[in-house]
Image (tube, rainbow, N blue to C red):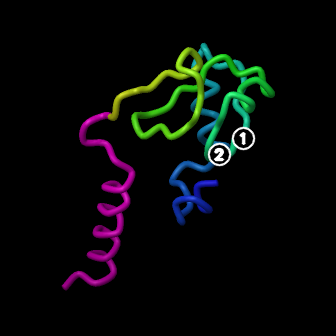
């Protein structure tokens, strides 16, 4: 879904994200999901709560949704840019 929607491979693939999420004691199960989630998807999979960042576009009832604020200074776009700059400097140090 990330490749289809954003055009790049995520830094942490699904199995890595699953492992991180399953380490949270409140998480019972982690399943693959479409990019956009709706109430029908939540019902079909018996999901109690969708937790998402402030960039949420999912159409889910408010009592089934928890929005987390962005962490200032943390951005995957900025991290990718730093890595590309570092690699470019390593390959062509001039």
The magenta stretch is 71-94
> x, y (%) of residue 69?
35, 29
> x, y (%) of residue 82?
29, 61
* In the image, residue 25 above or below residue 18: above
* In the image, residue 92 above or below residue 8: below
* In the image, residue 74 above or below residue 30: below
Q: Main secondary structure of the magenta part?
A: helix
> x, y (%) of residue 3?
60, 61
Q: Which residue is mark 2?
A: 14
Q: Quadrant of the C terminus?
A: bottom left
Marks 1 and 2: in contact by CB < 8 Å? Answer: yes
Residue 83 tag number: none
Q: For the view shown, which residue lies furthest in the left direction?
A: 94
Q: Is residue 36 magenta?
A: no
Horizontal side, residue 76 vs residue 1: left or right:
left
Q: Which residue is mark 1?
A: 32
């Amino acid at each position: 879904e990330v490749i289809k929607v954003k055009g790049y491979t995520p830094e942490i693939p699904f199995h890595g994200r699953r492992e991180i999420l399953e380490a949270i004691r409140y998480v019972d199960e982690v399943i693959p999901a479409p990019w956009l989630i709706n109430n029908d998807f939540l019902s079909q999979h018996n999901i109690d709560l969708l937790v998402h960042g402030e960039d949420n576009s999912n159409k889910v009832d408010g009592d089934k949704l928890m929005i987390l604020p962005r962490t200032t200074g943390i951005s995957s776009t900025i991290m990718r840019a730093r890595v590309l700059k570092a690699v470019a400097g390593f390959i062509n140090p001039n």
